[in-house]
Amino acid sequence: MKKFFYLSVVLLSVSGENFAVEDAIPKAPVSVAISINVLVQEAMMNNPELAFYRAEITAAKGDLKTSETKSNPDADFEIGRKQTSPKLSNLSDEGMAWSVSIAQTFEWPSRLTLRKAIANRQIDLATIGLARFQRELQNEIQRAAFNLLIAQEKRDATLSVAQRGEELIQALLQRESAGTSPLLETRIIEANILTLKRRANEAAKLAEVALFEVNRLRGKPIATPLSIAPARLRFPVLEHQEELIGLARTNSFEIKSQVLELGQQGLKVDLAKNERYPAFKLRTFYSQEDASEREQKAGVGVSVPLPLWNRNKGNIDAAKSRFEQAQASLTLTQRNIEKQLHENLAHYAIDQKEISRWQKNVLEHLRDAAELADRHYRLGSVPLGTYLEMQEKYLEGMEAVLETQAEALAALKNIERLTGMPLGNVIAPEATTPQ
C-alpha cells in the first residue's frame, strides 16, 4: 500500500507539471477567418493613405485652374484739390481734381499655354502616383496577409506537435514499466516539448507583428483579432521574359513618372525663356479738374518694364539644370528597374520551379506521417529517434514549403510592380465571411 500511495503521488505531480507546460504554450486567438482577397478589398477601400493621393490630384486640378485664370485688373482712384495762380495776375482759383484708371496685365503669347501644360503634367503625375500606390498597397497587403498566414500555421502546427507530446507523456506514465530507458525517453520528450513551446512562442510573436501590419494597411485598429483563411497559391510560368523586360522600360510606374517629370522640366525651361519678355499693362484712364476752368482727360496707356538688367537668366539656367537632372534620373531609374526585374525574374524562376516539383498535398502527407509516427511509437513499433525525427522534419518541411511560397509571391509581386502589369490572380478566390 505504501508503494502504491507513493507511485500515485509521483504520477499526480508529474501530470500536474505536464498540464502546466501545456497551459504555457500560446493559444491561437479566436477570430473569424478572412480570405486574403477580402483583405485586399478592405485595404483598397479603407486605407487612410489613399485620401492623401486623392487630395494630391485635387490640388493639382486646383493649380490648373489657377494657371488658366487671368490676373485681376488694377483700379486706381485719386481725388484732391487744384489751385491755379496766373503769373501776370494776382487772381487765383481752386477746385476739385480727381482721376480714375483701370489697368489689365497681359502675358506674352504662349505663356499661358505653357503654364497650363505644366499644370496638366502635374495632374498626370498625381494620377500615376495614386495608381502606383494602389498597386503597391494591393501587393503589400497580400504579402503581409500571407506572412500572417504562415506565422499562424507555424504556430498551430507546433502546438499540435506539442499537444501530441503531452498526450504521449500521459500514456507513458500509465504504463507499468520500470528502468532507466523509459525514464530517459520521457525526459527527452519533455525537453522536446519545451523546445516546441519556444518555437510556438516565436511563431506567435511573428503572427502579432504581421497582424499589426495587416490591420494598419486595411485601416483597422491595430490590435483587431484576425485569422487568415487557408489560401491556394497558383504560380504561373513566366515564359516571355524579354517581353516583360521591354515592358518595364516603358510601362513601369517609376519610368512613367520620370518621363512626365522630364517633359514637365522641358516645359519649365520654355516658360523661363518666355518670361524674359515681361508682361505689359494696358490702362484706361479718366481725369477731371475744376479750377478756373473744367479740364477733362481720357485715354489709353501702356506700361511695359524695360528688360535692361533682369533678363531672367538665373531662372533659365536653373530650369536647364533641373532638366538635365531629370534626364540623368530617368536613365538611372531605367537601369535600376531593369536590374531589379532581372533579379526578381531569376528568384521567381527558381522558386516556381521548386514549387512545381512538389507532390500534391505535400503538407498533408507530412502531417499524416508525423501522426503515424506518434501512433506507432505508442505501440512500440517505432523507436524514439524515429518519432522525434519525424515530428521535427514535419515542422521543418512545413516551414520550407510556406517560406518558399512567400518568397515566390514576393518576387512575383515585385515583377508586377516593375512591369506595371498584373500577371494573373495568384491567390485563388475563396468563399469566406468578412469580419
Image (cartoon, rainbow, N blue to C red):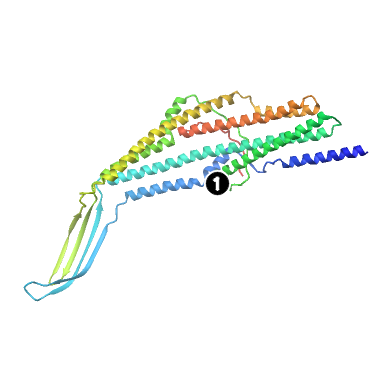
Q: Residue at x 58, y 25 (%)?
A: 354
Q: Residue at x 52, y 44 (%)?
A: 45
Identify which residue, 332 or 69, lies in the foreground.
332
Q: Position of residue 144 (x, y in %)?
A: 57, 38
Residue extending farthest left = 88
Q: Is residue 263 visible?
A: yes
Q: Is residue 424 visible?
A: no
Question: Image check: 279 left or right of 297?
Answer: right
Identify which residue, 204 or 416, lies in the foreground.
204
Q: Residues within 10 Å of mark 1 (few under 14, many from 20)?
A: some
Q: Quadrant of the C terminus?
A: top right
Residue extending farthest right = 1
To which residue does mark 1 refer? 219
User: Does 412 appear above or below 295?
Assistant: above
Q: Position of residue 156 (x, y in %)?
A: 68, 37
Q: Quadrant of the N terminus?
A: top right
Q: Residue at x 76, y 35 (%)?
A: 190
Look at label 1 and name its amino acid: Gly
Question: Image check: 263 left or right of 79?
Answer: right
Question: Image check: 246 left or right of 376?
Answer: left
